[in-house]
Image: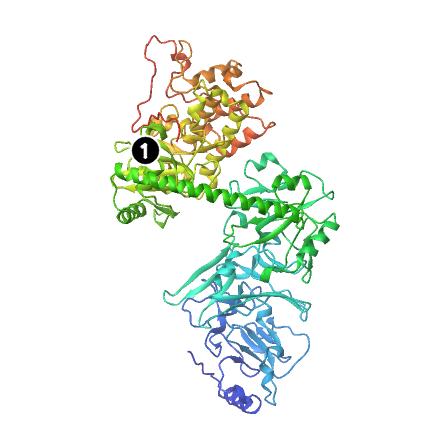
């Protein structure tokens, strides 16, 4: 602690006199500025518990000076409040004092003009300025009769907590106070070396159902959601901070504010609006002497204000992240399918005729500045009020504690909604929809419809009894099978096997969770279920030939049935497979992390000695090639199914390239790696060859070229250069195969010896593109989609990678009837001859590129 000796002896004696006569209870105090004790550059005052310090500071290398408050015990000077942030001193000769009118005043170097003041309108006397241990700098009246109540909060004439800068401290109130008329808010610094008011602010909107906004010059960037009794509905992380701090939200006639308190007074925590436009909560870690980032916003795509527009719901677990509720459709379909959901959704049917309510769980409530709020109404009364008003669009509880209470009603478009998982937070929201939309959604039309509820409960009960009966029978049957499997299969004891499998899996399942350009990365372990070899053998009837779905260079795939009755596909890698432990680990690393409706789901794995087994969800219709290239089955794929498959593959590939946690290049996209469920929905599989791209990486080189003849782009096959455009090329081949029903490799037209790409290109240039269409696809209502798919396919297989579209553009091309598509350029044949070569007398069937480590797959399905 620093003690400062005043140079002028007379002033020193006078100060003692004042202290003894007028301020006896403040003698020897270091936290005060009195009328006779001003503060100069080389002086500071320190709070009684030495938590905070106030004085002059100059940020960075500037010669501009400010009066501020910072933490006393933290070595790294951390400014939490600035008095004159927008009116700095041009040199260090300023003076902070109590003026004749009782205000705190900051004077310039000439001691003539006031740079900053507490600016109380009414004149006062007998005031002191004191720095409290909370970090609050207060101006208060001194009772010469030693009335201690004069130091209490109610007697503060002015306080810095009412005028925050960029930091919210414990006990500081963010929001409105009726007595002072202030709506206290945070405003960021201009930059790291300039504490003047910046562009970003954090403001509590007290209208309607109050909530806090992060703004950029008044433009909303992020919204907390309204307070629901436990937390802001858009900040589920608040609940997890219980052991560290408590949050307080007060809403009454006198004030509306948000605040927080720490459980331990020795802890330091602060909420800051950063000059870069983010909201950050820091906690001080004493052991490591650093400020730890405890929480921040915006933290993901769905934190962006109105990411999905009016009536759109944002969900980071979905792809795309924007979804329309039942009864709504995208307002701008073209932009929507290009992953721009800002235009939102629109209703498909009018309201006010037998309407009902769609129940949405775990929701961040919509923007609520115009919301009607009644904290004493029940939810049932809230619903009745909403039904009576044709303008009502949704309702919800205002407080979710104790079973829920209060009523909030929205009468405008629902903005900035977000879906959370059940484990994260949010609350129930009831959105008004037409009765027909409600029936399609499978919801009960009215919350009071007891008959439907009873019927549903009875049906569920009967279903559970039936499932229990079936499970019991299956369990008895499987126990008998286990005995036979154990006689025919040499296995390790379960305990030893599980330990070895766990050890191997941990080695195989560590993936980068953060990639940077320095090459360093943090790692985290997967939570992927492990299966004992005996369990897998039992599920597949000891890998019987009858359960075999297909076979390829990697090994075999079997259909299996787990003990609980779930059908699975078991991929058993051959001991001699070209896909070794690296490919196995790669697939575990990647696919276990990916969640998308058009990607196959990995359910678990098994590692036992030399056995490497992956367990997937079962696809009833096996792989695309098992139907598409089978003359007897190809008629199952009518044109609409084929078009849906093309669009589904495109969505899955877009997720890999753009929307997943990592940018992933598949590198082995082909018909046999597209699996079809019972409704012919496509799912991309086999990620053994996939690669992760980091940051803004656009391409990479490899000495080990992997892939399949006929699907590889020229730059990859010839030079080992791969990128998202390599996958786009493979997708283009797939599109042309799906349209034509013919394989690219092995396709020869008459004596020209063209592969499929060359044949398609020839027909397109001659204006006969429709001749490429597979006759088994049935009659067409319109040829438009077929021709567009052929054009998109040819655009994707263009020889130069830079000419090929990305997958976002591909989806827009496929979904739009009005978008003008560019004319395709020459394809990259690679496995065929260009037209001027086709007249050669060579008898060779196929001129192929030389490719290393190429897989030629014979799999029918998995």
Visual colour scheme: rainbow
Classify residue 675 by image quadrant: top left
Percent of width and height locating residue 654: 48, 36
Percent of width and height locating residue 223: 58, 54
Percent of width and height locating residue 432: 67, 46
Percent of width and height locating residue 465: 50, 45
Q: What residue lies at 50% left-to-right and 17% top-to-bottom?
A: 776
Choose between 555 and 95: the one closer to the eye: 555
Q: Is residue 212 left or right of residue 547?
A: right
Classify residue 733 by image quadrant: top left
Choose between 109 and 649: the one closer to the eye: 649
Q: Secondary structure at mark 1?
A: loop
Q: Is residue 654 left or right of residue 216?
A: left
Quarter of the image for the N terminus: give it: bottom left
Is residue 714 something one can see in this rendering? yes
Query: Which residue position holds label 1?
Result: 543
Q: How many numbered badges does the structure rendering display?
A: 1
Classify residue 18 by image quadrant: bottom right
Choose between 414 and 405: the one closer to the eye: 405
Is residue 327 something one can see in this rendering? no
């Amino acid at each position: 602690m620093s003690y400062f000796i005043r140079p002028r002896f007379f002033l020193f004696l006078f100060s003692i006199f004042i202290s003894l006569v007028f301020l006896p209870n403040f003698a020897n105090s270091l936290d005060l500025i009195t009328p006779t004790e001003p503060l100069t550059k080389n002086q500071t005052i320190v709070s009684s518990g030495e938590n905070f310090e106030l004085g002059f500071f100059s940020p960075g290398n500037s010669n501009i000076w400010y009066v501020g408050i910072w933490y006393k015990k933290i070595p790294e000077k951390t400014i939490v409040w600035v008095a004159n942030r927008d009116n700095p001193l041009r040199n260090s000769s300023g003076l902070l004092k109590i003026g004749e009118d009782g205000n705190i005043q900051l004077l310039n170097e000439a001691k003539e003009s006031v740079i900053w003041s507490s600016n109380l309108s009414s004149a006062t006397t007998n005031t002191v300025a004191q720095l409290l241990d909370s970090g609050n700098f207060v101006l208060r009246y001194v009772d010469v009769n030693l009335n201690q109540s004069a130091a209490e909060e109610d007697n503060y004439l002015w306080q810095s907590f009412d005028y925050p800068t960029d930091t919210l401290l414990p006990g500081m109130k963010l929001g409105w106070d009726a007595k002072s008329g202030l709506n206290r808010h945070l405003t960021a610094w201009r930059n790291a070396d300039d504490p003047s008011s910046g562009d970003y602010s954090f403001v509590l909107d007290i209208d309607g159902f109050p909530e806090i906004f992060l703004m950029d010059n008044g433009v909303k960037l992020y919204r907390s959601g309204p307070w629901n009794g436990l937390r802001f509905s858009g900040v589920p992380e608040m609940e997890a901070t219980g052991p560290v701090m408590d949050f307080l939200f007060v809403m009454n006639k006198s004030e509306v504010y948000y605040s927080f308190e720490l459980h331990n007074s020795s802890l330091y925590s602060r909420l800051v609006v950063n000059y870069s436009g983010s909201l950050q909560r820091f906690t001080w870690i004493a052991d490591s002497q650093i400020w730890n980032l405890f929480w921040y916003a915006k933290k993901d795509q769905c934190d962006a204000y109105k990411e999905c527009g009016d009536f759109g719901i944002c969900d980071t677990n979905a792809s795309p992240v924007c979804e329309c509720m039942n009864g709504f459709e995208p307002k701008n379909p073209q932009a929507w399918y290009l992953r721009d959901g800002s235009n939102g959704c629109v209703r498909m049917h009018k309201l006010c005729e037998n309407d009902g309510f769609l129940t949405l769980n775990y929701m961040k409530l919509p923007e609520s500045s115009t919301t009607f709020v009644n904290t004493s109404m029940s939810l049932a009364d809230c619903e009745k009020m909403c039904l009576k008003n044709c303008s009502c669009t949704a309702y919800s509880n205002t407080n979710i504690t104790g079973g829920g209470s209060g009523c909030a009603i929205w009468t405008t478009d629902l903005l900035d909604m977000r879906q959370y998982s059940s484990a994260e937070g949010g609350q129930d929201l009831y959105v008004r929809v037409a009765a027909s939309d409600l029936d399609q959604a499978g919801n009960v039309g009215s919350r009071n419809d007891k008959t439907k509820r009873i019927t549903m409960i009875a049906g569920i009960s009967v279903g559970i009894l039936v499932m229990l009966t079936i499970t019991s029978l299956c369990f008895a049957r499987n126990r008998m099978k286990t005995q036979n499997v154990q006689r025919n299969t040499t296995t390790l004891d379960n305990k030893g096997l599980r330990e070895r499998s766990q050890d191997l899996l941990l080695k195989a399942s560590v993936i980068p969770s953060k990639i940077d350009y320095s090459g360093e990365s943090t790692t985290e372990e997967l939570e992927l279920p492990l299966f004992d070899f005996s369990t897998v053998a039992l599920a597949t009837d000891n890998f019987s030939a009858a359960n075999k779905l297909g076979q390829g260079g990697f090994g075999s795939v079997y259909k299996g049935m787990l003990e609980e009755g779930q059908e699975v596909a078991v991929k058993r890698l051959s001991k001699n497979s070209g896909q070794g432990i690296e490919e196995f680990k790669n697939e575990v690393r990647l696919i276990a992390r990916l969640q998308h409706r058009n990607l196959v789901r990995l359910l678990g794995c098994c590692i036992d000695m030399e056995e490497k087994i992956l367990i997937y969800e079962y696809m009833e219709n096996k792989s695309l090639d098992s139907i598409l290239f089978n003359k007897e089955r190809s008629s199952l794929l009518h044109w609409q199914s084929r078009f849906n498959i093309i669009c589904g593959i495109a969505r899955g590939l877009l997720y890999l390239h753009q929307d997943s946690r990592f940018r992933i290049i598949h590198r082995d996209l082909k018909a046999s790696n597209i699996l079809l469920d019972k409704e012919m929905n496509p799912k991309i599989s086999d990620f053994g060859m996939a690669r992760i791209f980091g940051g803004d990486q656009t391409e990479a080189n490899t000495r080990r070229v992997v892939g399949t003849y006929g699907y590889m782009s020229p730059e990859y096959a010839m030079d080992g250069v791969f990128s998202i455009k390599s996958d786009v090329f493979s997708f283009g081949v797939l599109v042309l195969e799906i349209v034509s029903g013919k394989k690219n490799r092995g396709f020869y037209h008459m004596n020209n010896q063209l592969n499929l790409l060359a044949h398609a290109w020839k027909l397109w240039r001659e204006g006969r593109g429709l001749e490429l269409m597979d006759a088994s696809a049935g009659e067409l209502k319109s040829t438009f989609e077929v021709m567009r798919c052929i054009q998109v396919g040819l655009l994707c297989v263009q020889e130069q990678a830079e000419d090929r579209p990305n997958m976002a553009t591909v989806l827009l091309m496929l979904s739009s009837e009005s978008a003008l598509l560019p004319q395709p350029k020459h394809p990259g044949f690679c496995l065929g001859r260009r037209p001027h070569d086709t007249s050669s007398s060579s008898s060779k069937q196929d001129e192929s590129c030389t490719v290393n480590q190429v897989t030629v797959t014979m799999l029918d399905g998995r």
